[in-house]
Amino acid sequence: MNNLNETLIPKVGVITDVRIDTPDIKTFRVVTTDGEKAFDHRPGQCAMLSVPGVGEAMFSITSSPTNEEYMEFSIKKCGCVTDWLHQAEKGQQITIRGPYGKPFPVDDVFAGKDLLFIAGGVGLAPLRSVINYCRHYRDRYGKIDIVYGSRSKDDLLDYQEIIEEWQKDEGVNVYLTIDNPQEGWDGHVGFVPNYVKELSFDTNKVAVICGPPIMIKFTLDGLCDIGFDKTDVYTTLELRMKCGVGKCGRCNVGAKYVCKDGPVFRCDELEELPDEY
Amino acid sequence: MRKCSLDKLDLLLGEIAKSNELYLPVDDSDGSAVYKKWEKGTALSDALNTVRSPKDFFFPQTENLMEFKMQGKNIEIIDTRSELEDFVIFGVRACDVKSFEILDRVFLSEPVDSYYAMRRSHGVIISLACTRPAETCFCKTFGIDPASPSGDISAWKTESEIFFEANNEKGEALLSSLGALLQDCDNEAVEAQKAKINAIMDKLPLKNLTTEGFGGGKTAELFDDPHWAELSEACLGCGTCTFVCPTCQCYDIKDFNTGNGVIRFRCWDSCMYSDFTKMAHGNNRLTQKERFRQRFMHKLVYYPENNDGLFSCVGCGRCLAKCPISMNIVKVMKTIGGDKGE
Amino acid sequence: MQKITRDVLIDKASALLSDGTVSCVLGWKKGEFDYDVTPAVFTTHDELIKDFVFSDFCGANFSKYLVSKTKNIEGRILVFLKPCDTYSFNQLLTEHRFDREKVYAVGIPCEGMADISKVRAISGEGIASIDTSGDKMLVTTLYDDEPVEIAPCDFLAERCINCKSKKHVAFDELIGEDGDVIDSNRFDEVARLESLTPDERFAFWQNELSRCIRCNACRDACPACTCEKCVFDNPASGIENKSPANEFEEKLFHIIRAYHVAGRCTDCGECSRVCPQNIPLHLLNRKFIKDMNDFYGEYQAGAEVGMRAPLVDYTTEDLEPGEVFDRRDTDA
């Protein structure tokens, strides 16, 4: 664990592997200089990665806590820190601190339930940690449905893992979709919220949504239309963060700090917060 | 209770400064008061308060957090802090002493901010009761008594004498170390002084300002109040209110490349600034109305919700005096939350 | 000269509202005390009667507000402009920062505005009331029932003591008689600083700028600072900073800002008025104005719409860069 007294001082991390996932998403494998995991975490928690001189930013931990060797971060190229990371090679050192935020309630609320994961684009990154955690402890959960969509086939994150592992698991159903028809794609075409409605899941399950704000909004509306209760739907938020520990004052929505009280929120809790996220 | 005559104050300050760095409000070249380190001949300012609040002592405008040395692909992290000596802040007003409690709840709650904690543990606070409150004062609204300031030691100044009372062991140790410069006394003069201050408090124009209608759990009621638009209409979006405020504690963490390594430092930030919540892919507070609302909702609703009803304002009046367009928390409190009348 | 009263301005505003000339009015809203007025937009006669004020504390330069307030409005906005404000008004028009057709400008005479910190220095803390209706200001405090009389020379803001013009260079309508450009002493303090040795001058600015808390009020109030995105707010600029990493950077901010507004600064003095730390920032800008006057001939930014400032207007008579460099020695 990170020394709580020195929460702003990070550890040195080493990038031991870089995987190109999509044209703008890469997955980085990170360990400490001793070759170990930097710290333990729970599914849904985040870490602050930084490149000294470039900046520090919060990323969700993509790998499952059950992976005891390393952590993975799937990072989309969209700003100073991420641009820099995308140019980094194996062996590059960065800094890492965490874990931050409240995890998904995988051991209580999720236990014994059927689970529905819905992700759009890079929104699969935070869910991959939970999905792999639930796959690892397969007997603790009911049926697992995963709906995942992206702009195109090339933009689907973790495609190999989905095809080679997730789809082959018993009791796990993966529904992939892309926004527009594409050569070499014989799967579903269409936006995630519509696809979720078409699939018309039974509502006796817990749903988790992650993706762009607009996708979350429409998907949540869709789930409610088919009879889901907001108390059974979870999502994760992303706002600008600096400290990660609820002190620097910028990631609050109402009285809640996304870094400390989130990033995981139950949708009915979210509804009580002011519309400022 | 102990006392010292005012003409011996200089000797007393000198004695304190022998074993601790001593800071006190002094008159600056521009006519306003500022906390400065005591040197021989430094006189305590008569001003009601300093423009910059004493939060600087524990949460400075800029502070280095760490240094990075980079070589090839490798990074070395260096904690550049050195151990602090004890220091004494003399002449802190009741409102500002209260602000430390508000900051403590942020920085000393888990996980503790060790930078703040270190400064805080080395600071000894000698508060000073107000003698001439200004029209901009409204500390009573937040339950603060300017005649009975807290701190490690409380002090009262009369025409000819200054009185001290230790409030804890730290304060007692300091007072005891001053030996013969202080004489034991009863509290008659101090009680008279308190009565005098309280009589003035009853004449202050903002004496009836109330926190009624604010506090935790009021978000839904106040967030969409139609008055936020008009209140924020002329806001310049500068950081004056946040930077002179003793309780504003938002910060940014930034890197500075010295050419010989990278210094990561923390500096004050302001929720009034346009880039405060700006991310690579968007901003959840796009206009000044939202930023303005955030500042006051935080002080009057969000902070109390997370801190047992304690408001994040001490009524010091600095923002009233310094806002370039004279918009401030008093006007907000009188306007937001239904028809408050005149 | 008879002082302009609140009633005269309300009558004018109400008349222009009711005959449809304007749809709203940019004016001053009364505050908690007699001096803390806030710029505000009024749309009805009743709103004006309720909250509009005009006093010696209405010093804010409204020109810059027109950049935002003329956007998305139906009809025109009425703005009251003091003579010095009209220079900023013209300069903003020169830079195409707002649509002239959206504005109805009423020029109001000005005998100088008060600086509350000067008032406070004389009256003491605890101001209970301020009467600005007469020639002298009458201030009562919580500590004295007898009002303190303060003469204009003691309460006027520095920029008003050194007023450069009582003449309105832009207006649709004037209230009262127009004044003249004044031969002010505004460059005296600059000349004094020039006469110091470089070390003394450095010490002067070191002391002044060391008080800066980087609140950006000077920039945010400045009518010449109307960039959509300031370099100091832009993380991609490489110089974005909320706070100095060292002393050098603090000076850098103010010096860069002075360069950015050089030739466009009308010397309205808002930067110094809003500075919570009382830094005489206007002196930096005045130094530039004085130098440009010396090098290129007298030039007053905003005197007319469409003028080309010396620094963006090449003529064959222009000073050679070397001459400016040589001047450095005599300067010191």
Image (cartoon, coloured by chain):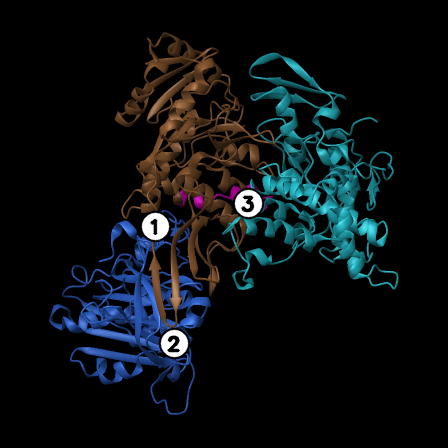
Are the residues flagged by discs 2 and 1 from a single subunit?
A: yes
Decide which of C41, A227 is in the foreground and name it: C41
Residue for badge 2:
A25
Structural distance between the alpha carbons of marks 3 and 2: 38 Å
> Which kind of residue does numbered mark 1 sit on?
Gly
Residue B218 makes an appearance in the image: no
- Whichever of labels 2 and 1 marks the residue nearer the N terminus, that label is 2
Instruction: Specify the segment rendered in magenta.
Output: B220-236
Name the chain letter of the residue that bears numbered label 2: A
Specify the quadrant of the image occupied by residue C274. top right
Q: Colour of chain C?
A: cyan
Are the residues flagged by discs 3 and 2 from a single subunit?
A: no
> Which kind of residue does numbered mark 2 sit on?
Ile
Mark 1 and mark 2 in contact (Cβ < 8 Å)? no
In the rendered structure, the answer to whether residue A21 lies left or right of residue B61 reads left
> Which kind of residue does numbered mark 3 sit on?
Cys
Q: Which mark is residue C238?
A: none
Judging by colour alone, the chain drawn in brown in this rendered image is B
Structural distance between the alpha carbons of marks 3 and 1: 23 Å
Label 3 packing within 10 angstroms: few (<14), some (14-19), many (20+): many
Q: Colour of chain A?
A: blue
